Structure formats: C-alpha cells, structure tokens
C-alpha cells in the first residue's frame, strides 16, 4: 500500500508545511491578483461540485484575503488549457491530466497531494458490471459496451487502458462499443441504466469508491425507480495502484502567493473543519506536501498509452 511514509521516502520529500507569506510582500500580489480562479476536474456533476466546494472556497477567500472563484471545467482538457492560458491559478488535477499538462508545457506545479482514509496516497480503477449480468472476468465482456470517463482521466482512462494492454486487450477491438461518459458519475449512470455493460471509475476499497458514494446518495435508480445497492454491482477487474490527485498552482505565481495557498490548504482541517470535511464526506485525511517529480511515473504511463493510440 502506498502510504505517506513510503511516498515521501521514494521522492525524497520532506513533509513540512510551507510558511505563511510575509505581509509586506503579500500586499504586492494582492494588488496583482484581486481574484483567483480554482478549477475542478469533472469527477462529479456540476451541482454536486458546487455544493461540495462552496464552503471551502469561502474559507480560501478569507484566508488569502482575495476572492477565490470556482470554475467547473467541462472536461479535463479545459483545466489544462485554463492553466496554459494563465486563467486558472489553482486546480485539483487528476494524476493523468496533471501529467498531460506537464508534458505539453503548461507551467504548473504540484504543491499538495490528497490523502485518503488510512493514510493512502494511491487508489485504483475498478471495472464495474451489474451483478445480475453475472460477468465474472473481463474476458466475459468481449463484444459488450464499455464506458470510460475522459481521455485525460487517470482512473477513468489511462490506468484502465494500461491494465487492459497488459492483458493483451485492445478496447476498440475487444469491446462492441467504447464511449466516454464525461464524468465518473456519468459512467456509473450509463452502467446502471444499461447503456453500457461495464463502466470504470475510481476505487479505494470495497467501502469507499465513486460507486459506493453514488449508491449512498441514492443517485442510481433501477427501471422501476427503486435505488440500487452496492450488492447490485460487481468488480470484474482492478488496475494497479495510481498515485493520488495533486493540487497544483501556476508556476509563475509569486512565491509568497504560492506559499500562502499551500498553507491555507494545510490549515483547513483545523481552521475550517466543516468545510474540509464536506469536500470528501469526511473520508479524506489532511493534504500533504508533494513535489511535481512524484508524478514522473504517471508521465511514463501517459506516454505509453499515447504510443498505443498511435500504433
């Protein structure tokens, strides 16, 4: 299991909190940045993201002393292009989309990593099917339809594609139809509605995944209107471990501003516990400092997947 200790040891990082910006220099960046934009990747539907992030954005605005506005991107590429143009100052990337941004010259740097319950700094992709269909392995799904999430999603495309390739499976040849749902929620909705036979989404463990959260909120309904339960779905395949998502900032932001953003995130669990808890339904641990080099292996995976597309 990838833990805080092993990851920091592997990357040579010291997990120390950044110091707060000096007041005199802070005034200079506040004049230049009267408003900051925080972009969120489309892991959920827009209304859910707004509700989840609203209190945290209010907290950030208060801590930084400047307005922080939420931007819900239409897709992963929009976050990348938003930072490329300099219009997105802070963002929560997925591992693959962050790797893609770095690979294509976006001046972005990781400052923090999400930490899941138990101190986990990694997660998986799960290939879900409806239990009633009685599929046991991925091989049982030859000729069936699959829903990925987004071409720039780590758990929604890059990691599952990488896993399938290790098994000698080319999705466009193996499956009857390959679709991109646009968000993790939509992939599971497509599966629940029978639009596809298998859908991929992120997975921490049997009790914490995107699907278990959706089931818990009653978001998945059967044809007769009754809600699905966790027992109505089966996992037929899991990917290898994926490093958790980073919080990234524009590299050319003033150093004091970057330090202040980082410190605000690190202080959130104590300064505004309710806002922090709402972000993950009380499932996540506090963020930990990270460096962009921790995602070098993800860049290698993305490059490998790119080579498959070209072949």
Image: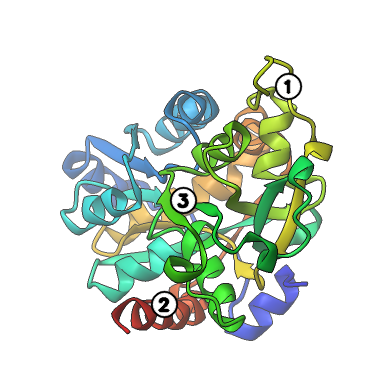
116 or 289, nearer to the observer? 116
The mark nearer the N terminus, 2 or 3, is: 3
**Numbered disc 3: secondary structure:** loop
Residue extending farthest top: 225
The mark nearer the N terminus, 1 or 3, is: 3
253 or 158, nearer to the observer? 158
**Numbered disc 2: secondary structure:** helix
Q: Give the residue drawn at x 59%, y 74%.
A: 163
Q: Give the residue drawn at x 40%, y 44%.
A: 182
Measure how far apart labels 2 and 3 are at the Cα level: 15 Å
The x and y percentages for residue 160 are 55, 66
Measure how far apart labels 1 and 3 are at the Cα level: 23 Å
The residue under label 1 is 227
Q: Give the residue drawn at x 54%, y 69%.
A: 159
Name the mark on residue 305. Answer: 2
The x and y percentages for residue 172 are 42, 66
Name the mark on residue 149. Answer: 3
Measure how far apart labels 1 and 2 are at the Cα level: 36 Å
The x and y percentages for residue 190 are 53, 37
29 or 199, nearer to the observer? 199
The mark nearer the N terminus, 1 or 2, is: 1
Q: Is residue 26 left or right of residue 242?
A: left
Q: Is residue 246 visible?
A: no
Q: Is residue 42 left or right of residue 32?
A: right
């Amino acid at each position: 299991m990838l833990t805080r200790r092993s990851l920091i040891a592997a990357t040579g990082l010291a997990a120390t909190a950044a110091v707060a910006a000096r007041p005199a220099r802070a005034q200079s960046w506040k004049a230049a940045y009267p408003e900051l934009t925080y972009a969120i990747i489309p892991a959920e539907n827009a209304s859910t993201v707004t509700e989840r992030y609203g209190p945290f954005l209010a907290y950030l605005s208060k801590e930084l002393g400047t307005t922080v506005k939420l931007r819900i991107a239409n897709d992963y590429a929009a976050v990348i292009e938003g930072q490329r143009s300099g219009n997105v100052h802070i963002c929560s990337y997925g591992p693959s989309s962050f790797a893609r941004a770095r690979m294509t010259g976006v001046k972005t740097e990781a400052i923090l990593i999400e930490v899941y319950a138990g101190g986990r700094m990694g997660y998986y992709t799960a290939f879900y099917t409806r239990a009633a269909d009685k599929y046991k392995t991925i091989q049982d799904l030859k000729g069936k339809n699959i829903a990925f999430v987004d071409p720039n999603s780590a758990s929604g495309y890059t990691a599952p594609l990488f896993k399938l390739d290790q098994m000698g499976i080319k999705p466009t040849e193996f499956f009857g139809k390959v679709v991109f749902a646009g968000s993790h929620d939509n992939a599971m909705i497509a599966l629940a509605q029978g639009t596809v036979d298998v859908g991929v989404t992120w997975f921490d463990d049997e009790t914490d995944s995107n699907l278990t959260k959706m089931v818990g909120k009653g978001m998945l309904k059967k044809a007769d209107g009754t809600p699905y339960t966790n027992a109505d779905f089966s996992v037929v395949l899991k990917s290898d471990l994926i490093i958790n998502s980073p919080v990234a900032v524009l590299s050319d932001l003033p150093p004091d501003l970057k330090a202040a953003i980082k410190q605000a995130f690190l202080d959130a669990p104590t300064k505004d516990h309710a806002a922090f808890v709402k972000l993950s339904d009380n499932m996540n641990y506090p963020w930990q400092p990270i460096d962009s080099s921790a995602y070098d292996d993800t860049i290698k995976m993305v490059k490998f997947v790119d080579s498959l597309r070209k072949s």
